[in-house]
Amino acid sequence: MKKLLIALLFPVLLCAQGDLKEKKTNWLTDYKTAVKKAEKEDKNILVFFTGSDWCPPCIALKKDFFETPSFDEYAKEYILLYVDIPRNRDLLSADQLAQNKELASKYNKRGSVPMLKVINENGKELGAMSGYSMNGEIQYHTKFLDKYYK
């Protein structure tokens, strides 16, 4: 009986897991678009500074937190802005890289990655958090995000 139940439920679980993997959170990459959307929706902006091709903690944070169903609830509360400074400059257009460097010089002067910043629609910084332990300790990130809901 147990084997039959497992055999029947296994395809259902695989389909559900596939749906989760296919679901992508929409991170904006244009600052002006993020500001306009934040004004329109009356939300704060969550800025994620990353080195996508060279920073192991950034890659781990993205996988362990941002690409999980639990982050989807947070994603509804913020406008998400992805600011990447990769070592491989071919990964971004020259305009995108210039914008990201400008944002980093304003909001991430030390160049820390991963860095989360919460700003309002006027560009005022409300909070910051840097680093990731790579031990799956996302509770610090969730507590940080809980502080800045509008």
Image: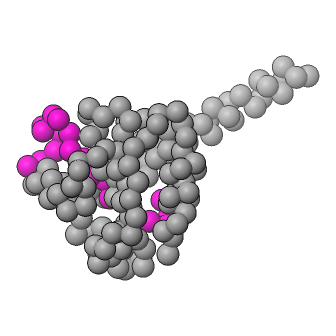
Farthest residue in the front direction?
110
Residue 27 visible: no
Say if 59 sits above or below 33 in the image. Answer: above
Say whether residue 98 is magenta.
no
Please report the residue visible at 50 percent of the width from the left and 58 percent of the height from the top: 144
Give the residues drawn in magenta, as a range: 75-94
How many numbered marks does the figure carry?
0
Quarter of the picture containing the N terminus is: top right
Please report the residue visible at 35 percent of the width from the left and 45 percent of the height from the top: 114
Say if 94 sits above or below 124 in the image. Answer: above
Farthest residue in the right direction?
1
Say whether residue 91 is magenta.
yes
Please report the residue visible at 29 percent of the width from the left and 78 percent of the height from the top: 122
Say if 18 sits above or below 95 in the image. Answer: above
Tell me where residue 127 appears, x and y as whole percent: 40, 64
Residue 8 visible: yes
Tell me where residue 120 appears, x and y as whole percent: 36, 73
Tell me where residue 63 appears, x and y as whole percent: 45, 38
Q: For this view, does 144 lie left or right of residue 4?
A: left
Please report the residue visible at 43 percent of the width from the left and 35 percent of the height from the top: 60
Question: In terms of depth relative to the viewer, which is nearer, 118 or 25?
Answer: 118
Question: In terms of depth relative to the viewer, which is nearer, 50 or 124?
Answer: 124
Which picture quadrant has residue 45? bottom left
Farthest residue in the left direction?
94
